[in-house]
Amino acid sequence: MKYDEKKFNSSVEEYKKALGKAKAKSFLIVFDIKDKRAFLSIAPLSRAIHELNCDINVMGIDKKSDTLDALNDVWMVFKQNKDGKYNEKTEALMDFVNEIEKRAQGKFIGLFEGPDYVLEAKEFGFEGSFTLPFKDGWFKEYRVKELDETCKRIWRDVYNLKKDEKVSIGFALLQKDEMLGHPLEDYLDSYAIVWNMALNCKTSTITMGSYTQRKSMLDKAENISELKTTIVGCELSKDIDEDVFVKYKKLSKLLKLDRINTIDASFFISGKGYPGRHNFGEMIGYPSPNKKTRWQSPGQIIYKLDFYPQTALDDRNPLARVGFTETLPIDVFIKTCNIDWKKMRDRNWEIKKIADMCKLIKVSGEKIDNFKTDFEVGLVRKDKIHRWVRTSDTDVREKINSEYLKKTGIKAGTMANLPGGETFVTPEYVKGTIVGDVVISIDQSYLLSEKNPLVIESYGNKYKIISGPKEIIKKINKKKEEAWELILNQERFKSVPQEVIDLKKNNFNKIGEFAINTNPSAKLCNYLIVNEKIARMIHVALGSGFEPDRATEYHTDIVINSPRQKLDIYGIDEKGSKHWIIKKGEFVV
């Protein structure tokens, strides 16, 4: 390990000893974004807090935070009400809470409880509910110059940041072993990456943050993040004339909750797990101002991506763009992201040109160990409209997707995978056999076996898992069960339009993506976000697609080793002519 693991583990134990009484409680930790020692100390501190079975929410601020001030005011007013100190503000808050509880039935009121413990980073350590020294001695600098170059390139070539833009940077906390999923060193590497991304972000306003993730999509979310999410969503819908929003608007005016401003761009690193369920979105939803649709979360409204069914019906512009990666090792992050983005995008466009002129794509490999990939991808809808073939989603230089605007007249947002490198499409149908032998992403990335691959049979409008690792199949089924429950809850509460519910049900067992990978620097590793970009390999996704008519509640990527399986991939046009992309696992474009 490139870091001092012994010192890291001893720091965790020292923090646990100091926090001994704080079991099954909630923590809020605040630090200044320029305080490197405080930021690095959050790694062992978050591990200690999680090993005590506590929740944690971390906010990195620049001297002060309007968001934090607004949350403190909400907590204070709620406490006043509990203490029997009634006033206009407590009345407005409880009117809002009680209106929600008509549906939530006790699941919502606890959201307004403040954290049990608050720690704020000062000059020499964390102060507040406990006094704790900084513990950053575990950290060692590694490839700093190249890491800086990579971060600069991402902000410049992927984001094209403006100086006056507000940026949020998210990172992964250290949880218990069963919630890491990948090596400890990878998580510690992510702290170096995030610090350098923040250091090289030359904008006027930066915030950083993270919170405890959950094992299941259906688990109760961490309280502080859930409260903030609810307030942001209600701010975006407060002019709606439904009782809950009328009451919220009154509360918002009294507490000046419009201080919680939205950002212009975000970058985050995700670890294992899920945010948990968003109760307000699931039970009530957020109506668009024109009342033509409802959203499940404020994040959907803020990013307004083109593949959301609601995007075409909501007149508002997207407010921000987003890019993300996983807890990649520094070496992998540098190798795959410090590249010539333009050159890679050029190859993506060559593949797109072929797909655009074809009605279908054929994918066929050699039989290996009794397994053979052999399937067909339909590219034309029943109304004769060609499915949108996209080039790699690594371009968030603008909030509004200009290609989509030109194509449809709809103002939608932009999203980036980092690293990037793929040409992908939402298939009209997929027929045949798929042999996944590299990696799959469920609640995190899991490696697949060449000897026991995940074999899927697709029949056009549905797929079936034929064979594969039992634990992987079990995890896929669990994710699908949870996703189905979310859909049924949205239908029961009418928090999402019925036509969107019907879409999600209809698309639930379809294959939503087919992609050809193009990143020349990506190599096999433990992470799908990299492996789904390895040049010459391909991937498919079960579930949700990237067009609004193909939405559902999950998206599970599976990577296929094209060179190993000696895949032939070519398009067939209306005249029956073949247009080659890959022969025997090697590019011909």
Image (cartoon, helix red, strand yellow):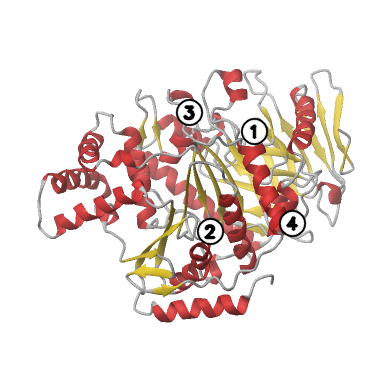
Q: Earlier in the sequence, mark 2 or mark 3?
A: 2
The 10 Å Cα crowd at callout 4, few under 14, some 14 to 19, many 20 or more, is: many
Residue closest to the far front: 123
- Of circles 2 and 3, the one toward us is 2
Query: Residue visible at 70% across and 50% down?
Result: 530
Give the distance between the C-alpha atoms of the residues marked 2 and 1, in whole angstroms: 30 Å
Give the distance between the C-alpha atoms of the residues marked 4 and 2, in whole angstroms: 30 Å
Q: Secondary structure at mark 2?
A: loop
Pick the quarter of the image with the C terminus: top right
| Residue ID for mark 1 | 426
Query: Residue visible at 35% across and 56% down?
Result: 223
Q: Secondary structure at mark 4?
A: loop
User: Which sits in the foreground, 172 or 464?
Assistant: 172
Give the distance between the C-alpha atoms of the residues marked 3 and 1, in whole angstroms: 17 Å
| Residue ID for mark 3 | 311
- Of circles 2 and 1, the one toward us is 2
